[in-house]
Image: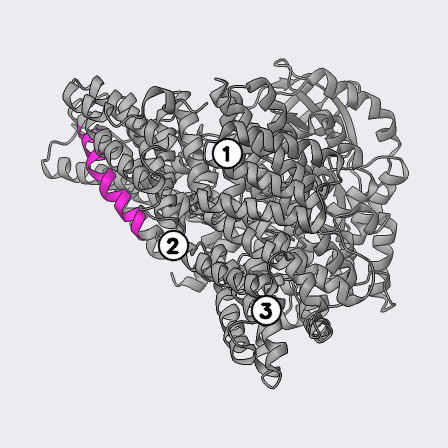
Amino acid sequence: MSTEIRTQITSLLRELEIESTNRRATTERLLEALYPELRRLAAALFRQERASHTLEPTALVHEAYIRLVDQDGADWKNRAHFLGVSARIMRQVLVDHARHRLAEKRGGGWERVTLSDAVELARGDDVDLLDLEDALERFATVDPRAARVVELRVFGGLTVEETAHVLEVAARTVDGDWAMARMWLGKELREDST
Amino acid sequence: MNPERYARLKELVLTARKLSPEARTAYLEREAGADPSLRRDAEDLLAGDADAPDLLASGLMAGGSASEVFSRGSGSLRAGPPPERIGPYHIVGILGEGGMGVVYHARQTEPIQREVALKLVRRGLDTERVVARFESERQALALMDHPGIARVLDAGADERGLPYFVMELVHGMPLVAYADSRRLNLQGRLQLFLDVCRAVQHAHQKGIIHRDLKPSNVLVTEQDGKPQPKVIDFGIAKALEETASERSLLTQEGQILGTPEYMSPEQASGRPEGVDTRTDVYSLGVLLYELLTGERPYRLRTAALREIQQVIAEKEPDRPSIAVARRDGGASDSAGADARLAARGTTLDRLRRQLAGDLDNILLMSLRKEPDRRYSSVEQFAEDLRRHLDGLPVRARKDTFTYRAGKFVRRNRVPVAAGAAAALLLAALAGIMAVQSARIAQQRDRALAAESRAEQKATTARRVSDFLVDLFSVADPQVAQGDTISARHLLDKGAEKIHRELTGEPEIQAALMTTMSRAYSGIGIPGRAVPLADSALATRIRLHGEESLETAESRVVLGAAHASLGEMAEAERAYRRGLEIRRKLLGPDHELIVEAASLLALELQTEAHFPEAETLYREVLAMMRRLHGENAREVTGALSNLGGICHAQGKIAEADSLLTLALARARTDGSPPIALADILAELAVVLKNQKRLDEAEPCYREALEIRERILGEHALTAQSYNNLGVFLRTRGDEKAALPHLRRALEIYRRIKGENHPDVAIAWTNLARTLSALKQDIEAESTYLAALRSADNSVGREYWVYSQIEHNYGAFLCDRRRYREAEPLLLRSYEGLKKGLGSDARRTQMAVEKIVDFYVKTGRPAQASRYRALLAPPTAAVKE
């Protein structure tokens, strides 16, 4: 991990906190800077993958956070933005990987992605990543903000408060979106599996 | 699914999931009975809701605001599966979770069998004391017997030593959610609220104050189809009071947990001794505000403790009739506003009309900052509401304009002489001018105030004050519609009026423009100040000629406007010309010459043209002696300024004796405390530079104490925090330095914005301390923030930028990041040399670092090349 990247990321995160005008552009730059790094981290994990191994995206993102920003100086808002951007990348990386494996028809090689305990979209069962992805894409056409809440919480491991900060809405709104999304996606996924 | 249908479904589901199964069925029947497919969709979704309380109802805690999220970052909020029992209580299930902990549905078997709610406080509190406090309240609590109060039955500690409270189990919905779900209109809401008041009143009669009233603490049940609000948690806040600061404010991280919006100013400022029944009046006011408008009186957009305290202590809430029309959050918010109206069965216009007037006044009276100015009891509050419902006149009145203007002036800490309205208004303007951000700006204003006095003597003074009186009275109704006096609004109005109405009276127009220009500089909108001063100047040149006192005045004011914009060259030019004219017309000694000379000297000092500034200060000192006599306070001030400029040039011994003399004089000659603080602050640095650290420290602290007391959140206070922080760091106590430096940065950023040299310097100081504490990551990002702020304010050509660049370079060098460090070190040296001269202390230190750098990187030739630039040791050691 080169120092320049760390410096750049740290400074972009700070910009996101400080500047309110250019958020979109700054987020884009952050995304660009983070993408290769996260891919590399994920790829390293994929290489080690074993049949029994389960991959938790949020753990990966948090690990990336530790490697790329270092906990020492950054505050929770920086962290929220970092995780927020990473969530999108992580989702992309994981889905790409899963599709790739599926295309290779090496069924069974790809372990299931475990979504973190706090999430539990469908009761008890692990959710198949690609099923979730499909359902989430459909859901995004109905309730884009709630879909983004899911992305942040599931792939980034953000708390309600962090999610609210990133989306610039009230925590109460996130709560509602989250509850709705869980019910909605849970229903879809149950229907899928039957 | 189309958007409308989805929105409807979401609303249904999110409301229904908080209800008990029976209430849910009834709710869906009522809301979606006519649309079976919608109802089926909702039921399908709800069937998969993992969180729905399936045992029972109760929005107990669940309805509490989500911002009460208890723990952050660790993912799940659940502390694991519920325990089987807590104390003697069997746990049946979870009712809800909130900022304080978990609320369980529990069963008591001994001595009687009953269902209860058990609230486990999850914080690390002093359990013994909490329980002891509860025990001491228990008798009083037992006296409460009211259908509107849920009884608190017991308190204890669980196995882990966490305190818990046992309460009567209430199956109900939180107040606002209930009113919304029943679509209660304004009248229905007021009736419901009056029931809450009766309950709280009953408690007050028994000597119990709630201290934590909020919608989630008022649950509404239905008995025989009639709503019955029940207030829960009585006595709990009191039992937890000892730890009130931890309870509500997590000071360690500067983040607030819990719901600070309902907290009264006396609670927010951490004065539990100031809590009485009127604290509950306030919280009830917040609660009614939300019940009627769907909004809270303040939008706390921050989690920072100081900011929240400040908002609660200072910000006037919007009038409810205005708050309901607020739609500033884009589409989702406007949907929210529509939902709020629908839930009240009304339209925006109608709701606004209903709220405007009495209800606005009643609510704002209950929400006043000072307990003495609120309703003195819940009884009175309720009485006024009943009078309103009965169409009788209410007691609540609008805050008077005089009161608000007075408060405005007080906030700006200017002594107001009682008297004519004009005096008050002029003082308000002076108050605006006094809100200044830097020492230099403050001194500039002090000098300008003298001019203001001179101006008042002029023939136009009467006309000017008439105009201002008129202006304020015109503005008043507008102000009354809004919430607070906006100085900017008044000035804009005034500027417009001047242009419009006074074209036939150019002399008065010019005088007023000059005044307005000063005021704009004062409230920190110098951009508007310049054009006003410019056109006043043009008018006056036309009327009075170039060489007139009027023209000179306009030049000086124009200089001040440029100076507050940071346009140093323009400021300097304007001051010089003003001084020149005044010398010619008034010389040799005159107050107005003193003023212009002092302003020019300050500007030159800012630009680091120290020798010329010193000459001017000496001249001013001599003039002051001749004009006022040796023992005058003015002489003390001049001595202190001269001491400052000597210090700036490294003439430490002379600075020391001048400032010591000024300090001794200031302590006895009645100089204002602020002037005393200025001297102390300067002297502290002088002493520090002589390594007389033990003498310096009390000076720093006394200066800070005075500024904190008199100025509050002000640039000078920030400067004192900063200097004390830097001092502690140089003493080697970085840990103690850190909070002072953070506080300094916080104040600077708030009052100066991100892009200001003082902010850049504050970042830099923080960065250096962080780096000393080995917090490298934050240190580095802090340096980058400093550079950005400096780049965007003073630009890269100014020595402050170079100094930051140097510090960052040194930081990198110390971390062996030599390749990155080198260009920074070299470039910053050039910048410092250009800005301050090659012999300046800072430049010399930059050279030393470069030498050090080349030694470390093993390039002796380069090292000796730079070593040659170092001044001889005797001169390099500045006394």
Q: Chain of mark 2?
A: A
Residue positioned 72% across, 33% down in the render: B667
Q: Is residue B355 left or right of residue B866?
A: right
Label disc, if present, on residue B421 of the rendered structure: none
Q: Secondary structure at mark 3?
A: helix
Task: Say if the magenta span includes residue A32.
Answer: yes
Q: Chain of mark 1?
A: B
Pointer 1: what residue?
B647
How far is mark 2 from mark 3, CA to CA? 46 Å
Sort mark 3 into few (<14), some (14-19) or many (20+) by Cα contacts within 10 Å.
Answer: some
Pointer 3: what residue?
B549
Say which quadrant the N terminus of chain B sits in: bottom left
Both labels 1 and 2 in a single chain: no
Q: Viewer-nearest of labels 1 and 2?
A: 1
Task: Say if the magenta span includes residue B134.
Answer: no
How far is mark 1 from mark 2, CA to CA? 42 Å
Q: Quadrant of residue B486?
A: bottom right
Residue positioned 81% across, 48% down in the render: B197
The residue lying furthest to the left in this view is A104
Residue positioned 26% across, 20% down in the render: B852
Q: Is residue A38 left or right of residue A79?
A: left
The residue lying furthest to the top in this view is B159
Q: Chain of mark 3?
A: B
Q: Viewer-nearest of labels 2 and 3?
A: 3
Query: Is residue B767 depicted above or below B505 in this figure?
Result: above
Pointer 2: what residue?
A21
Give the magenta part as a residue range.
A25-43
Q: Main secondary structure of the magenta part?
A: helix
Q: Amino acid at mark 3?
A: Leu
